[in-house]
Image (cartoon, rainbow, N blue to C red):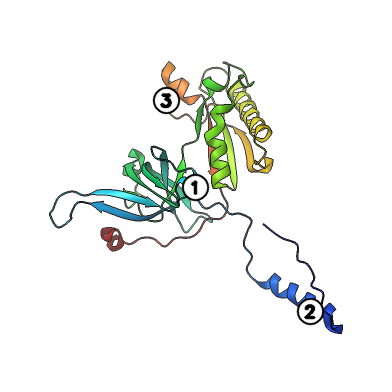
């Protein structure tokens, strides 16, 4: 947080000069930005069993945050990898898979990894398992059928408890920005679906900033995508229900650069 500099009271005649020099020096020093979001990251990989025996070993992943950041036993969190490409100003964030937390402590937690099938087929993903430096985010998706009546953008009564996980994530992890995405199925007119999804996203945003005083309104952005981004094909009633959703997407402008892990380093993990 930026703090106002107070001019010290110097007893000698040159007092007016020194504060100005102090301010000038401080201005030239690197500044720390306001509460940058630092997502949980994998810091170590453990192997159960012995590699020397030739038997397959289970990988367990140590994460640098735990109970103090609401990382609890049984939670399933998404694992992302930053991929820096020469033609992009910011890194790609690729979903590698999920980690199930099996132990949670103060300051650290341990989990098991399950790969994302799309990552297996992605040629840009060199290593198909979680690695040191990969970061973790919760899956913040809510069923629109639970929140809204069909065709309505008015939130149902008594559903505040459904937003607890999102509110806890904001309170403990302090993301830089959270985009509230509204999504519909393909039934009806596309323009109508665009508007409905936008109104629903805005209704969720308003509830969050009204009910949780620790949430800064500038943190939340509402965006409706209508039927443009389905999770699955809109070819059955079950699939359409899955596509009607509110999704919370974490975004932050500044991420720490990480050197690519070499194949040799990966084999040592």
Distance (Cα) linking label 2 and label 3: 68 Å
At 42% across and 19% down in the image, what residue appears? 238
Q: Residue furthest bottom?
A: 13
Label 3 SS = loop
At 62% across and 26% down in the image, what residue appears? 200
Distance (Cα) linking label 2 and label 1: 43 Å
Mark nearer the viewer, 3 or 1: 1
Label 1 SS = helix
- Residue beneath disc 3: 233
Q: Residues within 10 Å of mark 3 (few under 14, many from 20)?
A: few
Q: Position of residue 19 (x, y in %)?
A: 79, 75
Label 2 SS = helix
* Number of the label disc, if any, that sits on residue 68: 1
Q: Residues within 10 Å of mark 2 (few under 14, many from 20)?
A: few
Q: Residues within 10 Å of mark 1 (few under 14, many from 20)?
A: some
Would you place residue 99 above or below residue 191 in this image? Answer: below
Q: Position of residue 86 (x, y in %)?
A: 47, 59
Left or right relative to 205: residue 81: left
At 58% across and 20% down in the image, what residue appears? 148
- Residue beneath disc 2: 18
Q: Position of residue 75 (x, y in %)?
A: 41, 38
């Amino acid at each position: 947080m930026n703090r106002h500099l107070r001019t010290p009271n110097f007893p000698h005649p040159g007092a007016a000069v020194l504060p100005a020099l102090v301010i000038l020096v401080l201005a030239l020093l690197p500044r720390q930005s306001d509460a940058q979001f630092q997502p949980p990251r994998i810091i170590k990989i453990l192997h159960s069993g012995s590699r020397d025996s030739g038997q397959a070993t289970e990988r367990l992943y140590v994460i640098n945050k735990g109970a103090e950041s609401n990382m609890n036993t049984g939670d399933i969190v998404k694992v992302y990898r930053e991929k820096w490409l020469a033609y992009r100003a910011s890194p790609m964030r690729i979903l590698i898979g999920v980690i199930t937390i099996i132990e949670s402590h103060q300051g650290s937690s341990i989990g098991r990894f399950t790969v994302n099938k799309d990552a297996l087929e992605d040629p840009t993903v060199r290593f198909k398992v979680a690695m040191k430096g990969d970061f973790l985010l919760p899956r913040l998706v809510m069923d629109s059928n639970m929140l809204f009546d069909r065709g309505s953008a008015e939130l149902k009564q008594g559903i505040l408890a459904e937003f607890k996980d999102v509110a806890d994530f904001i309170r403990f992890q302090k993301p830089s920005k959270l985009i509230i995405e509204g999504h519909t199925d393909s039934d009806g007119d596309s323009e109508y679906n665009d508007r409905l999804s936008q109104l629903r996203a805005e209704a969720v945003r308003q509830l969050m900033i009204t009910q949780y005083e620790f949430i800064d309104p500038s943190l939340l952005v509402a965006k409706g995508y209508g039927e443009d981004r389905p999770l699955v094909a809109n070819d059955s009633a079950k699939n359409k229900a899955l596509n009607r959703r509110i999704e919370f997407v974490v975004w932050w402008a500044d991420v720490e650069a990480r050197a690519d892990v070499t194949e040799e380093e990966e084999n040592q993990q």
